[in-house]
Amino acid sequence: MEPRSAFDNLRSKDLVPSDDDDNSDNNSISKIATGANHSLVLFNSTDSVYGVGDNSRGQLLIESSETTSFERVNLDLRQGYRVVDVAAGWETSYFVQRHESVAIEDRGFISSPAETTTSQSDLLIAIGSNDFGALGIGSVDAPAAVAPTVKGKEKKSIPSSPQQHTLSFNHLLPSESTCLVTSIATGINHVVLILGIYSKHRPPSQLILGWGSCRHGQLGPVSSSTPKPSLRPPKSSQQPPYKPKQPSSKSNPSTPQPPAFIPTPTVLQVNNPSPVKRVAAGSQHTILLHEDGTLTTWGSNRKNQHPLAHPPRIIDVECTWNGTYLVTQPSPDKGGTNWNVLATGSGAKGQLGRAALSSSSAPSSSASSPAPALSSSDLLPVDLTLSDNPKIRKLACGSEHVLLLLGSETNGTTQLYVWGWNEHGNLGLNNNQDVFTPSHLPWTARGRIVDVWAGCGTSWLVVEEDD
């Protein structure tokens, strides 16, 4: 038997849309977004979105409770609009729709704001679960009861009438203004987006909006104007009534406690005057990267997710559920050539990408003792040493694993390094062992890896085949 290669467990997916579109450029994949058990694929320059996986909460807008092959998500788009971005929460899907007349650059940023009008503002479609107000429609559904099967396993039900909700943000804008969603980030049950504001009479500005779960402060400081959510308990009598969680005895009664959730898009309080250029969301924390290179950190820091230092020349920020990762660019004026990835947070499964206290390096312990977990409050580089100093093309964080795509600036070749949690073989290394330092994923198949995304125990590689 021939030995298996490191990528034998990687499954190839041919996701080219139907031939009714003659423009071959539309067949390139623009973005992949993943939730708990569903995935969305957006094709470049079209309104074509395909989905696969769980649909038990209506997050794919299909007729069955799940699908194992990609099906088109049949969105009801406003006339003259197309989908330019997608995102996914735990069991909720989001689609940014933009008017065709808006001139945009790559990655969805507006290039001619003066040419837009208020009638051409972006809209957001939300479908699926409304747990913790994830849909942003002003109410919160308590988790629906699930009837057990004979064997005691949960039985998924097909949504009776999955609904599409279209959110407009015009009521939050100054008069005679246009808004564009320039970035959207999703945690498990919270959403944060950057809303660019454009007007013929004022210079461009922005708002940071958010909604969903916020008990840990992942939507920033408490606002006195935060709307109170209305609860709609499930009809089934099997589901216990919802009881708001009370503040712990250790909390200061005089300190305002964050609400459990915010059910409608709300302007978040950002104290840093520098514009936000990037948002990343973990399970219970949120990181904002500002234009001046500083960071705003919100939410839980129980596992040291918040970077204590703000290194220079940060160009990207990403989050796993319980960690934060920064990409820094070398400084040409100082003769620097090395790109860096810095990490802080939980490293119990190797997520920090540096040597951990594992069974091989830790003092001997009994078989019943758990392996020591690494959690670092220090923002330190991942353990990656390269001789040719390639450029970082993409850092992708999944639930608790990381993909790093590197590219040569001389010949265009790419390399992929992976590390972290690997219980489901999501690192593509033909095993399910966690990886504590970046491991090179050899690629000998046709073409080259040109983009990567990471989800909840899944990894996605976009391969550009040779002509």
Image (cartoon, grey):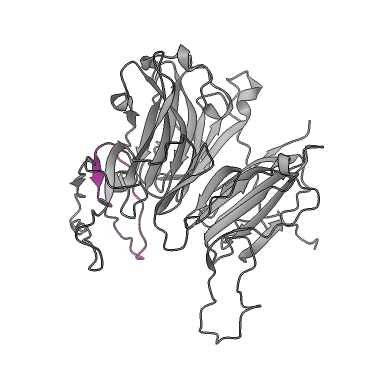
Determine if the magenta segment contains residue 37.
no
**Residue 156 place in picture, x, y as percent:** 36, 52
Residue 312 vertical placement versus 323 (above, below): above
Q: Position of residue 328 (x, y in %)?
A: 63, 46
Up/down of 129 relative to 122, above or below = below
Q: Residue at x 75, y 53 (%)?
A: 442
The reply, left or right, for residue 191 in relation to residue 238 is right
The quarter of the displayed image where residue 360 is located: bottom right
Q: In this rendering, would 399 be left or right of 5?
A: left
Residue 148 in the image: above or below residue 49: below
Q: Nearer the viewer, residue 321 or 65?
A: 321
Magenta span: 136-161
Please identify the quadrant where the N terminus is shown: bottom right
Q: How many marks?
A: 0
Q: Position of residue 210 (x, y in %)?
A: 35, 40
Task: Provide residue 269's location: percent of width, then percent of height.
Answer: 34, 41
Res 431 seen here? no
Locate residue 2: give its quadrant: bottom right
Give the quadrant of the C terminus: top right
**150 is within the stretch colored magenta:** yes
Q: Is residue 266 visible?
A: yes
Task: Looking at this view, name the residue that lies furthest to the front.
Answer: 334
Prevalent SS, magenta region? loop
The residue at 45%/33% (across/down) is: 73
Observer-nearest of 322 and 139: 322
